Image (spheres, grey):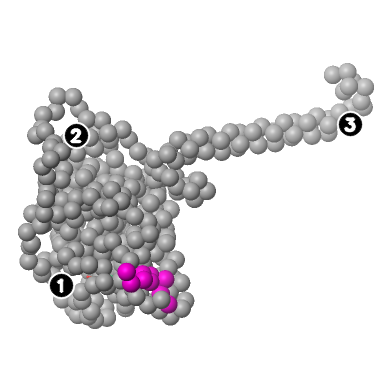
Amino acid sequence: MRFFTNIRPSITLPLLGILLLGVLVLTYCYSSFSEMKNKDVRILEVLGLCQQDPVNFRRENWSCRTRDMLSPQGLLYKQPSVLKGRTNVLTVTPWLAPIVWEGTFNPLIVDSIYKPMHLSIATTVFAVGKYVRFLRDFLETAEKHFMVDFKVHYYIFTDRREDVPAVVLAPGRNVTIIPVPGSNRWQEISSRRMEMIQTTIENQIGKEADYIFCLDVDTKFHGRWGAETLSRLVATIHPGYYEQTHEHYPYERRLASRAYIPAGEGDYYYGGATIAGYVGDVHKLAKYCREQLEADAANSIEATWQEESHLNRYLLYNKPTKILSPEYLWQDFKAKTNEVQIIRFSQVNKNYAEVRPNVKKRK
Ligand code: UD2
């Protein structure tokens, strides 16, 4: 104070102002720093579980809201055996991810663990052009079988808002319609899904959901699809190739494409119709596929099966943490096989030439 009393009042006031400003700036810097520090602590807490690059993770920290696997006391169920189980199919990959088949899980236990978690499940589905006709069956059967008793938010991407059917949804489930442009190339519609999934996660889904499923619309659910399908990065074995070895897979074999997979490499052939996982992990996958699709387009090349080819390359080098058997992705034109004890979700038969803006090609 003495210091100020010795100074003329015309200097004191501006000096006080500068001091006040300094204090404000320091306070602001300190609070921003603490906020960053807290964020880092949270990131580090989950890093053990998520093993993501901390730099990327800061941007994608929607992905890891893990919960304890609490099982209620007093729940009675058939004791699991370490000796008996499915023998005619592989139920775990060589990198120890489960492959989900009927008989590998007990729905009672799975539901008792996951339902109390109150998870939010985002589900994206594209219905562009004539594909809007598949929406009613998709939604009606999903309401019967898909993540029943969970909060499900359907994101319907369409250029035909007026044709989206009004389907009665169970409590806690809702629909958002996202307008997208049409196209006269089906390959473009199918591929562009990656870009839209990426940006919708950034703008909306990332703030709302714990898990995301990205599903084809020309499909129907026929049986339970529940919390046994939840994991960090989930892929589904394509029903057309599960009995074959990788030299017969329709991988992209041209070196010029970013989806290229060299001969001799491969695990399973995954279908583009179902991708799922933590929101952050699916965001990373969608962003990767989008970037590769764009790089290919800039080089005037289109991978054999568009985004599905890039997806297969991604999943070869970024192993999924859970794999769904072809029970979770069948095709109506295929006869059921012995391994598939139940068909839960299936691609309906469609007249490709009639529904697609530009014709044909079929696996
Ligand atoms: C396969 C994949 C599909 C995708 C495609 C390659 C399976 C069972 N399906 O199916 O996921 O990887 O190959 O690009 O693995 N769509 C429209 N309007 C159109 C065209 C497509 O909305 O005019 C959307 C719609 O959500 C459809 C999806 O894109 O379900 C995939 O297109 P598709 O079903 O015609 O592709 P398909 O049968 O070759």
Which residue: 44% across, 66% down?
A: 291
Decide which of tag 1 and tag 3 comes sooner along the chain: 3
Please tell me whether mark 1 or mark 2 is closer to you in this view. Answer: 2
State the separation of the CA atoms marked 3 and 2.
72 Å
Residue pointed to by mark 2: 112
State the separation of the CA atoms marked 1 and 2.
38 Å
Segment colored magenta: 256-264
Which residue: 13% across, 37% down?
A: 81
Q: Nearer the viewer, residue 156 or 210?
A: 210
In the shown orientation, is residue 270 left or right of residue 208? left
Residue lying at the far top of the rendered structure: 2
Residue pointed to by mark 3: 11
Most common SS among magenta residues: loop
Where residue 112 sits in the image (x, y, percent)? 19, 34
Residue pointed to by mark 1: 350
In the shown orientation, is residue 352 left or right of residue 272? left
Q: Are marks 1 and 2 in contact (CB under 8 Å)?
A: no
